[in-house]
Image (tube, rainbow, N blue to C red):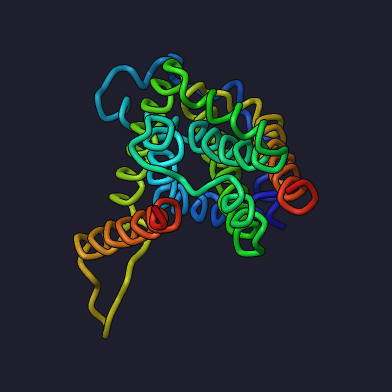
């Protein structure tokens, strides 16, 4: 029945009036630019996951391969690039945690927990996870 | 296709976004900046291999990586739709983004189960 009301062939209506939006519409306002920058953090998130797996792979291939990998990490262009990567990942973290109250509405005893408290809770979680990872990776030394 | 798949894809996107937000800055800073610059010292090679081979190590790396891949797929799909106005390539973009995330997840699973 749903199909009968809204059949597939009505999805594109070439005859309807549509205002053409230029491809670079998002450069026109700061808010749009921030939105698209936030959206474009996702390839860098994927890169970080790939790099982590490449590091694991280097570990698996033996000590010589791992030493080659760490030497690559130490080359100046790679360090600069990973400095930029860190900034982008931080941008993802801050924008993501700030949006958390928009996605999560918590109620205790019928009262909505204020947005600021939800954000603070998420930042606390970030701190705890970061401290745990630091303890895991460099706690022994 | 949307009704059933969209909530699942959104959950993967959202889980990936959260795990990336919480874990990636610390990992990127320690593994790819602080350690190469000599600010901190990572465990020795043998200890790292042992940690990665531990079932919890394998599992956490798999969950982290795969969720990050689906987070990318979902967000990048809509970036292409909205940013570049590519609504007419809807199906193709969905196949390419979720398909890549699935292939990368399979590669991660193979690496962590069979290679490491």
At 23% from the left and 71% from the top, the residue drawn is: A113
Q: Is residue A89 above or below residue A30?
A: below
The foreground one among B97 and A133 is: A133
Q: Is residue B7 visible?
A: no
Task: Pick out the residue farthest to the right.
Answer: B114
Q: Is residue A87 above or below residue A49?
A: above
Q: Position of residue A7 (x, y in %)?
A: 70, 43
The residue drawn where x is 61% and y is 64% is B56
Q: Position of residue B6 (x, y in %)?
A: 60, 52
The relative height of residue B11 versus residue B65 in the rendered view (above or below) is: below
Q: Nearer the viewer, residue B2 or B25?
A: B25
Quadrant of the image occupied by residue A32: top left
Q: Is residue A99 left or right of residue A114?
A: right
Who's the residue at 35% across and 45% down the image? A93
Q: Position of residue A53 (x, y in %)?
A: 62, 41
* Number of disc labels: 0
**Closest to the observer, A90 or A38:** A90
Image location of residue A2, percent across then percent down: 68, 55
Q: Is residue A26 left or right of residue B108?
A: left
Quadrant position of residue A37: top left
Using residue B104 as the reference point, say whether residue A93 is left or right of it.
left
Residue A15 appears in view: yes
Going 32% across and 25% down the picture, which residue do you hit? A33
């Amino acid at each position: 029945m749903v199909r009968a009301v809204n059949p597939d062939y009505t999805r594109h209506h070439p005859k309807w009036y549509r205002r053409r939006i230029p491809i670079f519409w998002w450069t026109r306002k700061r808010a749009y630019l921030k939105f698209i920058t936030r959206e474009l953090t996702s390839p860098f998130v994927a890169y970080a996951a790939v790099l982590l797996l490449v590091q694991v792979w280097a570990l698996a291939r033996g000590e010589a391969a791992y030493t080659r990998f760490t030497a690559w990490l130490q080359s100046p262009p790679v360090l600069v690039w990973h400095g930029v990567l860190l900034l982008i990942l931080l941008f993802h973290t801050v924008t993501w945690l700030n949006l958390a109250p928009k996605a999560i509405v918590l109620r205790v005893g019928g009262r909505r927990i204020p947005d600021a408290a939800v954000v603070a809770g998420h930042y606390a979680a970030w701190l705890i996870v970061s401290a745990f990872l630091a303890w895991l990776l460099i706690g022994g030394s | 296709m949307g009704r059933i798949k969209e909530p699942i894809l959104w959950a993967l996107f959202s889980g990936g976004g959260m795990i990336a937000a919480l874990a990636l800055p610390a990992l990127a800073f320690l593994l790819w900046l602080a350690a190469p610059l000599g600010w901190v010292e990572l465990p020795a090679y043998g200890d790292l291999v042992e940690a990665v081979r531990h079932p919890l190590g394998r599992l956490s790396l798999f969950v982290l990586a795969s969720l990050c891949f689906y987070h990318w797929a979902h967000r990048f799909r809509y970036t292409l739709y909205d940013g570049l106005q590519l609504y007419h390539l809807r199906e193709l973009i969905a196949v390419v983004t979720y398909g890549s995330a699935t292939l990368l997840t399979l590669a991660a699973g193979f690496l962590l189960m069979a290679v490491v």
